[in-house]
Amino acid sequence: MDFALTDEQQAIAEMARSFADEQLAPHAIGWDETGHFPEDVVRSVGELGMAGIYVREDVGGSALSRLDATLIFEALAHGCPSIGSFISIHNMCAWMIDTFGTAEQRQTWLPKMTSMELICSYCLTEPGAGSDAAALRTRAKRDGNGWRLDGAKAFISGGGSSDLYLTMARTGEDGPKGVSAILVEAGSDGLSFGANERKMGWRAQPTAQVQFDDCKVPADRLIGEEGAGFRYAMAGLDGGRLNIAASALGGAQAALDKALAYVKERSAFGRPIAEFQALQFRLADMETQLQAARTFLRQAAWKLDTGAPDATKFCAMAKRFVTDVAFDVANDALQLHGGYGYLADYGIEKIVRDLRVHQILEGTNEIMRVIVSRHLLAEA
């Protein structure tokens, strides 16, 4: 593993950061306050190759690495963690279709997904199946030349706004081997959505329950093999966890940048508070934690890129460590702002609210510990 970024990787990161600085950061607080989903801005990332980051080139993808993707999502989240994370979920869905879909499915769906003509949501979690995802109850039954879906998915980013819903549904026996992946188009008969959830953070992206009531889907929407959907979903989450960690890292870096600027400007007891050693020590710790998190994240991405046998363990460890560190750093940045950090105008409290969910989604950090411990015990 080479710790130095290539010229191409530096250019990729700079391109994503420029987009974030120009298109996301100036509007992030306003989107958060109004709950506005900037669909036009989200769709525009397709023109920059950020809608199919690690999708193959023959269908419009950028064919970049997972390490490259962490650079992109860290940069995007520096402008707005909510929007950067939303784009990461779409990328995870595109990769799953590219990797497990048929040749015809790849040609049918991915050119429109990599251009962001079609936005895709990932539908795994259910009201009664969160951490125990293999216990999902949404069912798909064969019906002539197609499927009929019944059930509900919870906490779905893009629910009611996306064009496609990559849905894990039970087509067979109980447990993980009875789950299949089925692509459902917006507008399908029997597809409906709950109200937009009122959330602590991530307010710039819609989140809603997705409801299937005798929802009719053509047979060719089954992605890959019947009964392999849970395996596909878990494979997608290895990379998804890296993306969510990268987004948390970008948000935390933005918070630290704001704190550094603030302590240089703010004076107390006759001098800038940046001169107080206690605050200098806290800043040093924040920087050290973020650099450690960044190194760990990139190592995990390298493991996934190279197909290392312990990649899943490293993705889980990185997700847990990076998101915990990122939240703590953002919270410390708020503290350094004093009362001003509690005000919406400074943008710090938004980052804290946004980053809290990164410790929950794509597998809670408690589940990350379960994954790591199981690998450790299996290796012992």
Image: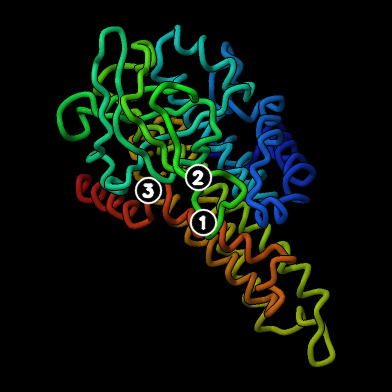
Residue 363, numbered label: 3
Residue 199, numbered label: 1
Seen from the viewer's position, the closer of residues 93 and 68 is: 93
Residue 207, numbered label: 2
| Residue 141 drawn above or below residue 83 | above
**Percent coordinates x, y for residue 283 in the rendering:** 65, 71
Question: Which residue type does callout 1 highlight?
Answer: Lys
Q: Residues within 10 Å of mark 3 (few under 14, many from 20)?
A: many
Q: Residues within 10 Å of mark 2 (few under 14, many from 20)?
A: many
Residue at 26%, 53% in the rendered image: 373
* Element carrying mark 2: strand
| Residue 91 drawn above or below residue 79 | above
Seen from the viewer's position, the closer of residues 118 and 194 is: 194
Mark earlier in primary sequence (1, 3):
1
**Percent coordinates x, y for residue 198 in the rendering:** 51, 55
Mark earlier in primary sequence (2, 1):
1
**Percent coordinates x, y for residue 82 in the rendering:** 59, 48
CA distance for labels 1 and 3: 18 Å
Question: Which residue type does callout 2 highlight?
Answer: Thr
CA distance for labels 2 and 3: 17 Å
